[in-house]
Amino acid sequence: MFIRENELQEKIKTLAARINDEYQGKEVIFIAILNGAFMFAADLLKSITLPCEISFVKVSSYHGGMSTTGRVDELIGLNASIENKEVIILEDIVDTGITIDKIITLLKAESPASVKVCTLLYKPDAFKGKKAPELVGMSIPNKFVVGYGLDYDEKGRNLREIYQLKED
Ligand code: 5GP
C-alpha cells in the first residue's frame, strides 16, 4: 500500500471542509496527539476557517516496534482549559482503538461540551473500541504503515507519503 502526497492532502482538505461546516458558529479546541499527528495537525489547521485553539499533548501509550501495547498513563501538556469547549482530537491513526478510548475518557473528565475524534487513518478490521472515530481521512487495511508523521522505531516521520512496511 502506498498513499501519495496529493491524495493525503485532498483527504485532509475534505476533512477540514467537513469540520468548518459541522462546527459553524462554534469555538473549537483541537487536541493533537504527539508525536504522530504533528504533520496532519499542521496541514489540517491551514484549512480550518473557524476561530480555534490547538494544544499538543503526549500520551505514554506506544513503545516502538510493530505492535501496540495500548498502555496510556496520562495526558502530558494539556495546559488549556477544555471545560465547555468543543474538542476535536487529532490522531494520526486509529488501530485497535485502545489508545483513543483512554484519551477520550481522560478528556471527558475535564467537562468539555463535546469530544469527537478526527483521524487521518483508520483500520476498521483491527478496531475493538467502543465507538468508531467520527471524522476519518481514509480507512486502510490492517497493515503497519510509516510516513507522514507515522514512525517505525522513530524513523520515517518526515516522509511526505505513507508506505506499508514490508513484512519479512
Ligand atoms: P491503537 O491503540 O488504536 O491500537 O494504536 C494507537 C497507536 O499505535 C497509534 O497512535 C500509533 O502510534 C500506533 N500505531 C498503530 N498502527 C500503526 C501503524 O500502522 N503504523 C505506525 N507507525 N504506528 C501505528
Image (tube, helix red, strand yellow):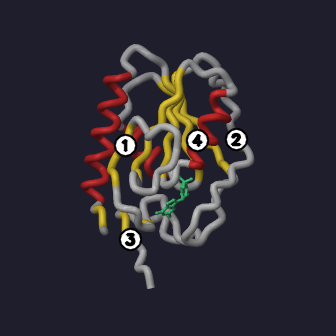
Residue pointed to by mark 4: 101
Q: Is ligand 1 within 8 Å of the beta carbon of the residue shown at mark 1?
A: no
Q: Report the quarter where the C terminus lies.
A: bottom left
User: Can you give x and y, in whole percent of width and height, for residue 95 in the image?
Assistant: 48, 55
Find numbered disc 3 in the image and state the secondary structure of the residue it sits on. strand
Closer to the observer: label 2 or label 1? 1
Looking at the image, which residue is at 41% across and 67% down? 143
Mark sitting earlier along the chain (3/1): 1
| Element at label 2 | loop
Judged by depth in the image, the label closer to the viewer, 4 or 3, is 4
Disc 3 marks a residue whose amino acid type is Gln
Q: Which residue is mark 3?
A: 164
Residue 12 picture quarter? top left
Q: Is residue 62 visible?
A: yes
* Amino acid type at mark 4: Asp
User: In the image as oriented, which residue stretches furthest toward the right?
Assistant: 73
**Mark 4 or 1, nearer chain start:** 4
- Residue identifier under label 2: 77
| Contact? badges 3 and 1 (CB < 8 Å) | no
